[in-house]
Image (cartoon, helix red, strand yellow):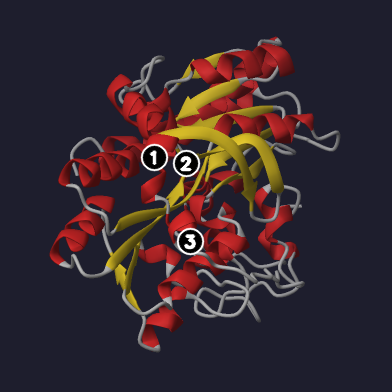
Amino acid sequence: MKYLDEYRDPTLARQLLDELHRSATKPWRIMEVCGGQTHTLVRQGIDELLPAGMRMIHGPGCPVCVTPLETLDRAMAIAARPGVIFTSFGDMLRVPGSDTDLLSLRAHGADVRVVYTPMDAVRIAQEHPDRDVVFLAVGFETTAPANAMAVLHADRLGLPNFALLVSHVLVPPAITALLDDPHCEVQAFLAAGHVCAVMGWREYEPIAARCRVPIVVTGFEPLDLLEGILMAVRQLESGRHEVENQYVRAVRRSGNAEAQDAVRTVFRITDRAWRGIGTLPDSGLELADAYERFDAARRFEVGGLQPAEDLECIAGAILTGARLPTDCTAYGTRCTPRHPLGAPMVSAEGTCAAFHAAGRTKEVSMP
């Protein structure tokens, strides 16, 4: 891919690491918010090459992982209904609910389909006017515009059989909640570049000012992350607390106005439950009144849900950065990518999946 190898240059990586070691005088704690960034850090071993005492804290930026168990159980109850075609991105199919997962439901006859965009679900609704087609709309601000456009398109087509099961979450309230925790150790943040490509970074400026914490908008390749860490360390060392943009090739301060307009038209801000974390005020999106007819949660009455988290899974502590995957007693034994106890071991952005793919064990994990 063009303009990709340039951001994986080992010589430049070594130079950035050397400069980082020269710049850091204290054992700083920096959180990368995005699970995609976590996978790069762990896969490349960057987190183990930092100056002595410095630690990367892995944040809650995995959209699959933070989807609450109740939403997953509701999804499976809807998917199991006759006449429903349930659609989702592939990484949601193996996320365990209280009793089963979408992949197992499909094996037992439910019409569960993997799609690559929500527009695929709209097309399926056009092709099957006699069946209800539901798309599981999860994720951060990154995926919200595409889901908004799917609703707008279905509205223009007059499709009464298309619906979203919405579980969108927002990054700034999560950062605020982490910083308001008296036990928080995070001293700087690497903000997710793709989220900021949509929303810009103006929302982060009051957080940085109020909490006196540096926030660096960062990309996803090794050199992106090394430079982002270095920028955060330079702020910490000089006592600054600003929002800086490392990801200049993709992000502007104002973000993408057209995408924001679509999201504001279709959705409104609401309180949202996060798996393993709890309900955070004004931290999610739900369909606005004008589009509530596309709300699968309203269309399908699903009662009697009693979500039951696996008691051995410490997903909540991992998502907030309080624990590492290797702290879990089930990690790599009773919980593996093929047989996961929790979402962080399933998702392509999950911290547990990143550690497992990199072969991390208790013996070699960070102190």
Left-right relation of 248 to 45: left
Question: How crowded is the residue under tag 2: few (<14 C-alpha within 10 Å), some, or many (20+)?
Answer: many
Counting from the top left corner in percent of width and height, residue 199 is at 42, 25
| For marks 3 and 1 on the same chain, the one whose residue lies earlier in the sequence | 1
Counting from the top left corner in percent of width and height, residue 163 is at 35, 55
Q: Which mark is residue 185?
A: none
Q: Which mark is residue 144?
A: 1
Question: How crowded is the residue under tag 3: few (<14 C-alpha within 10 Å), some, or many (20+)?
Answer: many
Q: Residue drawn 33% across and 24% down? A: 261
Label 2 SS: loop
Label 1 SS: helix
- Whether 320 is drawn above or below 261: the answer is below
Q: Which mark is residue 140?
A: 2
Q: Which mark is residue 347?
A: 3
Instruction: Tell me, yes or no, whether the two marked residues, 2 and 1, touch with CB atoms within 8 Å.
Output: yes
Which label sits in the foreground, 2 or 1?
A: 1
Q: Is residue 210 visible?
A: yes
Residue at the outermost left position: 127
